[in-house]
Amino acid sequence: MKCQQCKTNLEEIKFDIGYGINVESKHCKKCGFNVTDDKKMKTALIAFKKQSAKEVRVVRIGTGLGIRFPNEVVKGLKLKKGMDVLLMPEEKGLKIICES
């Protein structure tokens, strides 16, 4: 397979998306162009989400409740003290959206 941008032959690589989960991709060494099959990427992302899921405990903070995020989640999402997050109820639970 040739690169769509520079017509160089693409080489097969395994791309690490995190937590040791790899997805097969085709890569151009010359210009950096990548091609990844949608099904393979979706499968890898599902595995990534399952593996990166963390169980946390709800704790009392003053008269309210809070959640303590593990350090690896804080670093991975680049969370900072005082940052606003959006809590969104969903059919199967609660989604936390971090906006930067």
Image: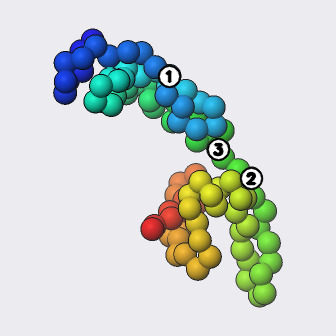
Q: Say which quadrant the N terminus sits in.
A: top left
List x then y, in percent, for residue 43: 50, 28
Q: Residue at x 66, y 46 (%)?
A: 53
Q: CA distance from mark 3 to mark 1?
A: 19 Å
Which of the two residues, 60 or 20, is positioned nearer the viewer here? 20
Residue at image mark 3: 52
Q: How many marks?
A: 3
Q: Is residue 13 left or right of residue 46?
A: left
| SS label for mark 2 | loop
Give the residue at x 64% y 37%: 19
Nearer the observer: mark 2 or 3; the answer is 3
Sooner in the amino-acid sequence: mark 2 or mark 1: 1
**Type of amino acid at the residue the image marks with label 2:** Glu
Dividing the picture into quadrants, the one containing residue 62 is bottom right
Locate the C terminus and report the quarter of the image it occupies. Answer: bottom left
Name the residue that disc number 1 marks: 14
Q: Position of residue 80 (x, y in %)?
A: 59, 71
Q: Amino acid at mark 1?
A: Lys
| Quadrant hosting residue 99 | bottom left
Residue 55 has which mark?
Answer: 2
Q: Distance between the Cα atoms at labels 2 and 3?
A: 10 Å
**Neighbours of disc 3 within 10 Å: few (<14), some (14-19), many (20+):** few
Mark whose residue sits in front, 2 or 1: 1
Can I make out residue 35 in this image?
A: no
Q: Position of residue 26 (x, y in %)?
A: 37, 20
The reply to whether discs 2 and 1 touch (Cβ–Cβ < 8 Å) is no
Task: Pinpoint residue 33: horizontal percent, then vertical percent.
Answer: 30, 30
Residue 36 visible in the snapshot: yes
